[in-house]
Image (tube, grey):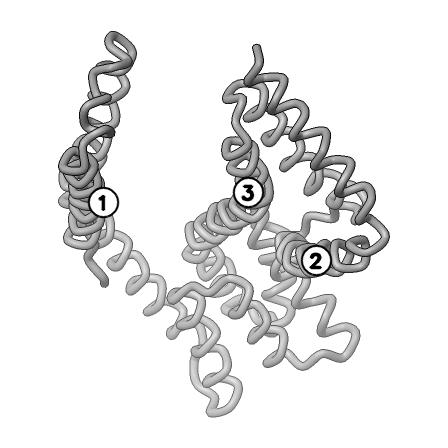
Amino acid sequence: MLKILILVSAFASASLLLLYLRPFTQKYLEEWQNRRMDKMTPRLDNMFMNVPLSKLILLDLLGPLILGGAAFFFLHSIMGVLIGVVLGMAIPLIVIKEMEKARREKFAQQIVDSLMVLTGALRAGLSLLQAFEVVAEEMPPPMSQEFSLILRENRVGVPLETSLANLKKRMQLEELDLVITAILVSRETGGDLTETFSQLIFTIREKSKILGRLKALTVQAKLQGIVMGALPVAFVFFVYTFNPHFFDIMFEESVGRLMIGAAIIGELLGIFFIRQFSKIEV
């Protein structure tokens, strides 16, 4: 009970101190918040997610407050509060990164179908921009969104080369790089673009088959890394649950602390090397 009162008093004191220093820190906090918004809003715009700035700021502020308060409630520790606040600040960026990754993977899965639509439209006698319109109409998001953006940029005077370069920068996919390079070379030197697209479809499909086989071959190593990484944590958790004082001697003796440090370092190195050895670049 005394410990909780001390923590509450410390939290209240820190809050009063921050309130007193608000006029001096408000400017720096606003600059810091603006920098975070400058990082997040362009990435959300690239995913065609129109989140109002006021809501985005509110969500960005609520994360640290909620996780910091939860950590204080469950752990009764200032260090836990700091960890919760840091996690609350990191989670929005992590979520945005995962959303970008998922969108990029979905876009990659649609490339072959889009090339088939483009090939059919070009063989029907349509121009390249008209073929882009067919892709924007027939393909689902995110492919339709990206090609619609290219068409809107073209209508306001943006060169096609610039629009394709922007698309390349947003998606960052090797398969898309091949498609854009083929389009740009064809516009400069001429040639049968439909035949080029047909070759690209074959190449991308063969690459997908190879990647699928590699994933099947490396899944065992990845599962082994997950199991080996989780076993020590699970062991410590169950032992501590049944006997909280089992590891006291390890923390009290210098040799025990060294052994714990060596075990943690060895565990992290093992996970790192398993992950590295299970990666195969194609």
Residue 32 numbered tag:
2
Is residue 40 visible from the viewing direction of this image? yes
The amino acid type found where label 1 is placed reads Leu
Q: Secondary structure at mark 3?
A: helix
Q: Which mark is residue 111?
A: none
Q: Residue furthest bottom?
A: 189
Residue located beneath label 3 in the image: 86
Q: Where is residue 203 shown, x and y percent of the image?
A: 29, 65
Label located before the other in sequence (1 or 2)? 2
In front here: 241 or 134?
A: 241
Relative horizontal placement of residue 82, taking residue 45 as reference (left or right) = left
Q: Residue at x 51, y 46 (%)?
A: 94
In the figure, 243 relative to 210: above or below?
above
Nearer-the-camera pick, 227 or 175: 227
The Cα–Cα distance between marks 3 and 2, rounded to whole angstroms, is 14 Å
- Relative to 186, 249 lies left or right: left
Is there CB contact under 8 Å for labels 1 and 2? no
Q: Which amino acid does the dot numbered 2 rest on? A: Trp
| Residue named by callout 1 | 268
Residue 140 seen anywhere in this rendered image of the structure: no
Residue 170, image x, y percentages:
55, 64
Mark with earlier residue (3, 1)? 3
